[in-house]
Image (cartoon, grey):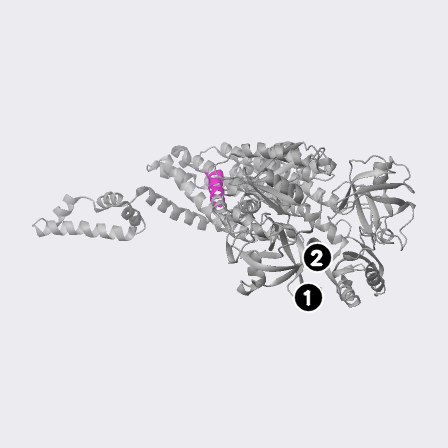
Amino acid sequence: MSFSSRIANVFRSDRLIHDLDEEFESHIDEAIEHGYDPAAARRAFGSPLQHREASRDLLIAPWLDSLRSDAIFGWRQLMKRKITSAAAILSLGLAIGACTSAFRLIDALLLQPLPIAKPERLYKLAYRGRGEQTAVDSLDYADFGQLRAAMKGAAELIGISSVDRMDLTWQPGAGLAAGLEKANVQYVSGWMFASFGLRPALGRLIAGSDDLEPGAHPIALLSWDYWTRRFGRDPNVIGQSVEIGRKYGIGNDLFQIVGVVNEGFTGTEPGRMTDLFVPATMSAFVNRPEASWLKTYIRLPPGVAPAAVEQRLRAAASKILEHSTTPWLKAPETIGMEPAGGGVSGVQRDYRQALAVLGVLVALVLLIACANVANLMTAQGTARAREMALRVAIGAGRRRLVQLVLVESAMLALLASAAGGLFTWWSTPFVVGRINPPDNPVRLSLDANWRVLAFGLAVTLAATVLFGLAPALRASAVKPALALKGGEDPHSRRRSMHALIAVQVAFSFLVLFVAGLSAGTFERLSHQPVGFSTERLLNIDTTAERAQPPVFWDQVAERLRAVPGVETVTLADWPPLDGYSYKFNAISIDGGAPSAVQAAFMNVSPGWIDAMKIPFVAGRDFRPNELSPSVAIVNEAFARQYFKGENPIGRSFAGRSVYLQGQRFQIVGLVRDARYRYVRQDILPVAYTPFHRLDAKGAVQDLVDGTFSVRTASPNPLALASTLRREVTAIRPGFHVSNIRTEHGIIESQTVRERLLAMLALFFTAVALLLAAIGLYGVLDYSVFQQRRAIGIRMAIGAQTGDIARPVTFDIAGWICAGSLVGLALGIGCARFIESLLYQVKATDVGAMAAPALALIAAAIVAALPPVIRAIHIDPASVLRSE
C-alpha cells in the first residue's frame, strides 16, 4: 500500500475498521460455503479484534495515528479544564503575540532588504570627523561629483538626499491656498533607478540624462504607494504639474510628472516612504558649498570584492575631504563602507536600540508565561499521576507518554499562537502609529513575509518545548507502584515549581527594573527645563506664494496682535526646538583667529526674546530698523565659549555658514541659555540675529517663509488656531499657513521614542506582574492541596492561624527573595547596554531598585491571600476522615 494511502487511512479510521470487519466476515462465509461448520470456522480464524488490529497497523501510519489519538485526548483534556486552559492560552498568546509583534517591527525597519536588484551589493559611504562621536554619510554636491569621477570603473556612486516633508500644490498658478498639501520628497541621482533595476509602472523613470545640469529638468516621479493613495492609480497623472516647496528648489518650482515607479519601492529610508522623486540637480543645495546633503551610496559591480573598492574609496575620499571648507571634516579619522541593502534612515538610527530593548522585554515576558504554564501543567500532573501509572502498567513506553503530554502542550501553544497572531495584527500598526506625530508619521511596510511567519512558528515551537518538556519528562518517569498507592513524594515536584517561581520573579524584576528606568527617563525628559516659557505658545508656520518684502510680514504680525485672545506676536525662522538649525563655522572674535567650535544662530524679530520670556543678563533687544548682518544677541554659552565668560556686549564676531559668508556682527545683548534644537541636546552657543536681513548685494531681502510665534490669553492656544489661520490668508492672500503647532506639541514630538518605550515597558510590566501573581497563586494553591493532611493534623492539635499560614508561605518567600536578587543583578548588569536611552536616571538609584521589589511584594501578597485563606479554613475532621 502507498504511503499516501496509509496517511489517508488514519483519517478514515471508522471506514477502515468497517472494511476490515467485512473482509473478515467474507472469509468466514467463504469457509462455511465450502462445508465448514460455522463455529469451527470462526474458531479457526481466531479473534476478529486481534486480526482487525494487526491488519489495521499494516494499512495505516502508526506514528500518525498515535499523534491523532493524542490530539483527540489532549483536546478533551483542554475542554475538561476550560477556565485553566483559557487562562494559559490567553497569557501565552499575549506573550507570543508580543514577541511576534516586536519582531515584525524589527523586520520591517532593520531586516527587510530594499526591493531592488541584488541589495547585498549596495553600500554607503561613512566617515567621522575629528572629535565627532557619530559617523556621517553625506557630501555636498561638488564633492560627490568629484568622488564619483574618482571611483569610475570601480563602482557606481549614487547620491540620494534625506526624505523631506514639503509643501506642494497640484493646482499650479491658483495660489497656495487652492490646494496646499504635504508629501515626502527625495532628491536622487538620475541613474539610481537603472542601477537598482527598477521599472516604470506608468510612464518613464528619471534617467541619468535628467540629472546632469542644475535646474535643467524640472520633472518628478511618483511612488506606487503615493499614486495609489493620492490619485487612485489614475493614469492621467502623467503630464500633470506640481509646485514643490519653494525654499528647496531652484529656478522654476513647477515640476512635471513623468512616471510612476514599480510597486514596492518607496525610497531608501525605512520608516519614511517617499512620495515624489526629483533629480538631485533640481535641489537648491546643488549650488551651495558646505551643504552636506547627499548620502553617498556605492553600488558594487558583480564579482567585485568590497575590500578592494573600500581601499580605493578611502584614498579618493581622503583627498577630497582634505580640501573641505568645513574644519572638522579635514583629515577625517575614519572613512569606510557600510552595508546599505536594507536602506539607511534616521528612524533606524533612533529606534534600533529601543527595538532591541523591546525585544528583550517581550522575550522575558514569553519566558515568564512559559514558566507560568509549566507550573500549571506540573500542578495538573499531580491529578494525572494515577492515569500515567495505569498507562505504564498496561505497557505504555516512556516515549509514548512524553509524546502524549507534548501533543497537549503543542495544542495549547497553537491555540495561543492563534490568539497571539490576532494581537500581532492589531498591535504592530498601533505601535507604528505612535512612533511619530501625525504631521510626520512613520510608515513601514508591514506585509507578512517568510521571516515573520518563520519567527512565529519558531516561537510557538520554543514555547511548546519550554513549558511542555519538563512536565512531559516528569509524567513519563512515573513509578506505577508508588503512584497507584498514592505514595508519590510531593516535595520534588514542589521544589521544581518553586524554582520556576524564582525564575519568574527574576525575569519579572528585570522587566520592572527596565520599565522603571524607561518611565523615569520619559518623566525627566518631559519636564526638562528648556530656558523659555512654553505656556500658551502657538507657532504658525507660514509660506508665501512668492518671496515677500519684510514689511508685509510685519503687517501680518501687527494684524494678528489685534485678534481677540492674542497677547503677543513675534517672528522667527522656525519654532524653538523644532529640530532645525543654522550653524556658523569658523567663529572669529574681534578679527582674531577662527575657532573650530561651531555656533548656532537664529533670525528673530524685535520682542521675540521677551515673548519667549528668556531673561536678559545685559544689553538690549533689537531695534525695529536693525537688519542682519549687523547686530546680534548671544546667550551665556556663547559668551563662555568664545569670550571665556567675560561680558561680550560691544564686542564683535564673524563667521560663515552655508547661507552666510564672512558676516560680521556686533553683540548688543546677552541672554540666559535656552535649548535650541533638541530637548536632549546640550546647551549650544547661540547667536540671535534680526529677522529682516540684507542679501549679498546689500538690498533688503524678500522672505518666502517664517514662523509667527503667538502667545495667547487662553490656556488652550489651539482654540485660536482656525481663527489665526484664516486671518493670515485674509491679511495677505499670498500667504498660507502650512502648519500650526503648540510649543508643548513640538516638545512632546521629541519624546516620542521615550514615551513609546515607557508605555510598552509599563504594559509589559503589568503583564509580567499578572503572570507572576498567577504563577505564585498556582504554586501556593498546589502546596495547600499537598499539605492539607498535615494542616488538618496541626489544626486538630490546636495550631493558630499564623502557625498554618507560615509553613504555606515560608518556603516560597525564600525563592521570591532569591529571584529578586538575581533579577537585581541582571538589571544592574544590563543597564549599561541601554545607557544611551536613559536620561538623568541611573541603575544604581535607590528608587530604581526598590520599586520592582515593592511591586513584586505587593503582587505576592495578593496572590498568597486566597491559598492562605483556604488553608486556615480547612476542616480537620473532614480531611482526616477522607485520609
Residue visible at 69% across and 32% down? 331
Q: Residues within 10 Å of mark 2 (few under 14, many from 20)?
A: many
Label 1, label 2: how far apart the Cα atoms are? 14 Å
Q: Earlier in the sequence, mark 1 or mark 2?
A: 1
Q: Residues within 10 Å of mark 1 (few under 14, many from 20)?
A: few
Answer above or below: position of 29 versus 772: below
Instruction: Label 1: state its secondary structure.
Output: loop
Q: Nearer the viewer, residue 448 or 102?
A: 448
Corner quadrant of residue 843: top right
- From the viewer's perspective, is 629 left or right of 88? right
Answer above or below: position of 248 versus 593: below
Where residue 574 sits in the image (x, y, percent)? 77, 52
- From the viewer's perspective, is 687 left or right of 334? right
Q: Which mark is residue 72?
A: none
Can residue 578 be seen?
Answer: yes
Where residue 341 sits in the image (x, y, percent)? 54, 42
CB under 8 Å between callouts 1 and 2?
A: no
Highlighted magenta segment, given as a residue range: 455-468
Instruction: Label 2: state its secondary structure.
Output: helix
Image quarter of the N terminus? top left
The amino acid beneath tag 1 is Gly
Can residue 772 be seen?
Answer: no
Where residue 841 sits in the image (x, y, percent)? 72, 38
Q: Nearer the viewer, residue 407 or 706?
A: 706
- From the viewer's perspective, is 511 left or right of 462? right
Where residue 294 sits in the image (x, y, percent)? 64, 45
The amino acid beneath tag 2 is Arg
Residue receiving disc 1: 173
Q: Nearer the viewer, residue 560 or 416?
A: 560
- Asked if the stretch drawn in magenta spans residue 673, the answer is no
Residue receiving disc 2: 246
